[in-house]
Amino acid sequence: MAGYFKDIWLGVSTVLIGMHITFKHWFKFKKAVTIQYPHEILEMNERTRAHLFNVADECAVCLQCARACPVDIIDMQGIRADKDEDLGLLPTGKPKRMHLIKFDIDFSKCVYCGLCVEVCDTKSLHWRAPVEPCTFTREEMYKSFATIPPDEVERLIAFDAERKVKKAEEMAAKKAAAAAAKAAKAAKAKAEAEAKPAEAGADAPKAAKSDVGEEKKETPAASDTPEKPGTPDSPDAPENTPKPEPDKS
Amino acid sequence: MTWLDLLIAVACVAGVLGFISVVALVAIWTERKISAHIHDRLGPMETGGFHGWAQTIADMVKLLQKEDIIPDAADKPLFKLAPYIVLSATIASFVVLPFGAHLIGTDLNIGIYYLVAISSLEVAGILMAGWASNNKWALFGGMRSASQMISFEIPIGLSLLIPIMIVGSLSMQDLVGAQAGGFWNWGVFSHLPFAMIAFIVYFWASLAEVNRTPFDLPEGESELVAGFHVEYSGMRFAMFFLAEFANMFLVAGVAVALFLGGWHAPFSFLEISAESNVILHNLVGFFWFASKGMVLLFIQQWLRWTLPRLRVDQLMHVCWKIFLPFSFVNVLIVSLWIVLTQS
């Protein structure tokens, strides 16, 4: 019987304790845990893994990120700076040698894997706290991080093309000179050979061999012909620039 | 029956239905806000501007547009009928609720008896819904609901007997009229502490009657999905919902009428006498009745967000082993008291 009343008392008292606790929360209501999202946005850590961002001034344009990207959405282009041009130092301590004229990320395809951030040597490509990722059109998902203004980009491209033409001309001149020298040498050798009594059949293959050698030498010059203005002429840069724009726009 | 009678009847039902809808809308909104604040949340904040007051209206509009889905395997006539029975039983109970001196559908001389009887009809509706859905969870919910409502009718009836014995009438207006002249004349404070115990027992048992937490086993979201109304959608679901919240106000209204002075103010100077202005007298009475009912409604919601759900055996333990003996002893002592003091 005592247990029975004790149970009832326990029931009543614990209910009252519970009601007291909830009452305190109900009326001594200070700060809700709710965040009224569109009105107030939670302050996130500076480098929360939420959104990619590239600092153009710190980018070495090494193209590692574009290579690492499993979905090929980083569309970047660089132009080698002139020899006496000073672009400042990279965070790694080395001087910046490339103008970043294009760095576009298509966030509608991004899988947020972070591989591009991992491979970035200068840490210019990094994670950032979210800025509203939602957009009304797909075009808005296509974000550009290059800071060089368009007319400057045009100027750089023109400059680069000019430089290439010049270089190609130089190369051609060099080759011509080399060829001339070779031809002279060959002529000399021929003269010597003719002078000596030798087999007639040996002449033809020798001439053909020299022709092949000339062609081979010319191939690298042909690959960076001046028709392709945007491609920088650094050995690894030009071939790896992601596919041209037409399929993106 | 003349045209006028019919018109008055229709006006009465329309008035009750309008009141029920408004109460349900307000109660659902307060339920959301109270639950949110108890959890340190904010609850609806956007719809309608001020603290999301229009959220429930928006939900209602949404429910009106929803498709009325009837399961293939359901018992279709019963399935369609069940929400009407539940809602009409609720509306019929409101007929005898005294909102003011003249604001009462009809002052039956067996008013409270009628109310207890007609609100039992709801059990039939809920059991029907659970059975007709042809869904095991719905059937479980319906069975639990029936068992707990029938069990708790007994302590409820016995607790209501206390004020009825004290006043000596079953008419709602007689019961309210006996509590006039200040809060110390209210039913809870007569025959201390026995009427008080009766009030507490009634209030707790009424929570089980309207399937509220801690006795919301028929709906038990974590076990039964939604209990007896799991298969209902659209307006039929809205009817169950409306009936649930209207019932909350109904049991609160009965508690107010029998124990808390009905439409009388806590102090008599806060009332306007019927001789000076009948309309104002009724309106002020309505204000007091509705606000007292709302306070009890808040307590129901407060309890809901405080207590966990009981188990079925605990529920039956509370009913048969605690409420029932207390009510019986209460009735015995109060009747003895009345017999001794009246002779």
Image (spheres, helix red, strand yellow):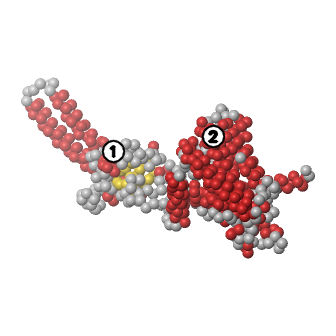
Secondary structure state at the residue bearing disc 2 = helix
Q: Position of residue B63 (x, y in %)?
A: 66, 48
Circle 2 is placed at which residue position?
B143
Chain letter of disc 1 in the image? A
The lab-note entry on whether marks 2 and 1 share a chain reads: no
Q: Is the residue marked by circle 1 packed among few (<14), some (14-19), or many (20+) residues within 10 Å? A: some
Quarter assignment of residue B233: top right
Horizontal relation, residue A191 to residue B284: left or right: left
Q: Is residue B9 visible?
A: yes
* Three-letter amino acid code of the residue under disc 2: Met
Q: Are marks 2 and 1 in contact (CB under 8 Å)?
A: no
Q: Is the residue marked by circle 2 packed among few (<14), some (14-19), or many (20+) residues within 10 Å? A: many
Quarter assignment of residue B28: bottom right
Q: Position of residue B217 (x, y in %)?
A: 58, 46
Circle 1 is placed at which residue position?
A67
Q: Position of residue A178 (x, y in %)?
A: 19, 43
Residue depicted at x 90% and y 52%:
B3
Residue B182 vs B137, above or below: the answer is below
Q: How many marks?
A: 2
Q: Which mark is residue A145?
A: none
The front one of A18 and B333 is B333
The front one of B166 and B219 is B166
Quarter assignment of residue B267: bottom right
